[in-house]
Amino acid sequence: MSSSQPITVITGGAGFLGSHLCDRFIAEGHRVIAIDNFITGSPDNIAHLIGNPNFQFIQHDVTNYIYVEGRVDNVLHFASPASPIDYLKIPIQTLKVGSLGTHKALGFAKAKKARFMIASTSEVYGDPLVHPQTEDYWGNVNPIGFRGCYDEAKRFAEAMTMAYHRHHGLDTRILRIFNTYGPRMRLDDGRALPSFVGSAIRGEPMTVFGDGSQTRSFCYVSDLVDGIWRLLNAEIHEPVNIGNPSEITILEFAKEVQTIMKEFTGREAEITFKPLPADDPKQRQPDITRAKSVLGWQPTVGRAEGLRKTIEFFLKKTATL
């Protein structure tokens, strides 16, 4: 390892997003140290990196004291459950990794004099009354609702990050991630795309909640990772939305998945409807004006292309293609 080679610690490094970040930072010449406790991450996501001289893995719960020997230049705190099925099942761990975990990661970055990035979320906007959502919108969140464990953990994490920036002078970044998809998602993670695909693979109807008129904006993972890379290397401490502003209703999205699944498998899945879960946001679309102006970033992967890549990954993983 060169003495000038950047060293980046990624918490949640065995997760869907974290593992793609490991790939990108290694490709950019960094030595990457991934930390994960496998609550929602998987060894499969980083198996291809084992043995790479620029990759190190530490199995650890970041709500406890974090120790890494030697210099560290960047700390990216991506450890957290990130889908409703996970944070409804483990709400206390979700709150702890957003609060205690963020505090430990910030303290670690401060001790190492490292740049710090918190992976926040569009969920800080709750069920938004402003559309599309800009970074200066404060949100409409139910703190004691079923989703509050995730929403409030991330809002706290942002507040803690800004406190470390203002009080300790820590060089910080706040990333607000909107719906993201791509290879290495878990079929059972409860989010729209893997749920639709998983149902179709099993020969079951794809479930749309409510009447499907609620909207989301889906960003392919490589676009998100590029935005993260640019944000880390930009000089901005205020939150930045990273997501794809192409808005679509969930029912339309289900029909797109239905069409592509039929292309691959020759079978057409049915679509069924169930009641809308509590506090489910009715609309979600990022305003990416800040990302465009400060980072020179905007998404480049179209939804049809991204869906085909992701669905092909799922079908290969389940050996049905």
Image (cartoon, rainbow, N blue to C red):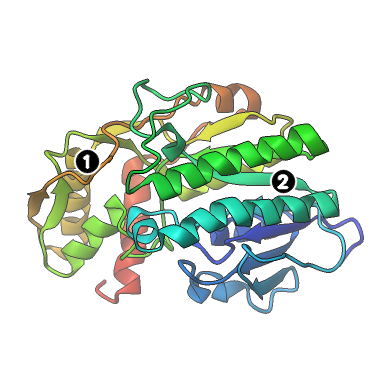
Q: Nearer the viewer, residue 93 or 76?
A: 93
Mark 2 is surrounded, within 10 Å at the Cα level, by few (under 14), some (14 to 19) or many (20 or more) other residues, namely many
Image point (59%, 31%), residue name: 239
In the picture as drawn, the residue positioned furthest to the right comes out as: 3
Q: Secondary structure at mark 2?
A: strand
- Residue 86 is situated, as x and y percent measured from the top left of the image, at 37, 60
Q: Which mark is residue 250?
A: 1
Q: Mark 1 vs mark 2: which is more N-terminal?
A: 2
Q: Is residue 223 visible?
A: no
**Where, by quadrant of the figure, is residue 35 drawn?**
bottom right
- Residue 317 is situated, as x and y percent measured from the top left of the image, at 35, 72
Mark 1 is surrounded, within 10 Å at the Cα level, by few (under 14), some (14 to 19) or many (20 or more) other residues, namely many
In the rendered image, the vertical position of residue 193 relative to residue 125, given as above or below: below
- Residue 260 is situated, as x and y percent measured from the top left of the image, at 22, 53
**Where, by quadrant of the figure, is residue 96 drawn?**
bottom right
Quadrant placement of the N terminus = bottom right
Quadrant placement of the C terminus = bottom left
- Residue 50 is situated, as x and y percent measured from the top left of the image, at 64, 77
Image point (46%, 36%), residue name: 124
Tell me the CA gap for discs 1 and 2. 34 Å
Q: Amino acid at mark 2?
A: Phe
In the rendered image, the vertical position of residue 33 relative to residue 233, given as above or below: below
Q: Secondary structure at mark 1?
A: helix
In the rendered image, the vertical position of residue 257 relative to residue 40, given as above or below: above
Q: Is residue 189 visible?
A: yes
Image point (69%, 41%), residue name: 232
In the rendered image, the vertical position of residue 257 relative to residue 202, given as above or below: above
Q: Give the residue pinned by disc 2.
A: 116
Q: Which mark is residue 303?
A: none
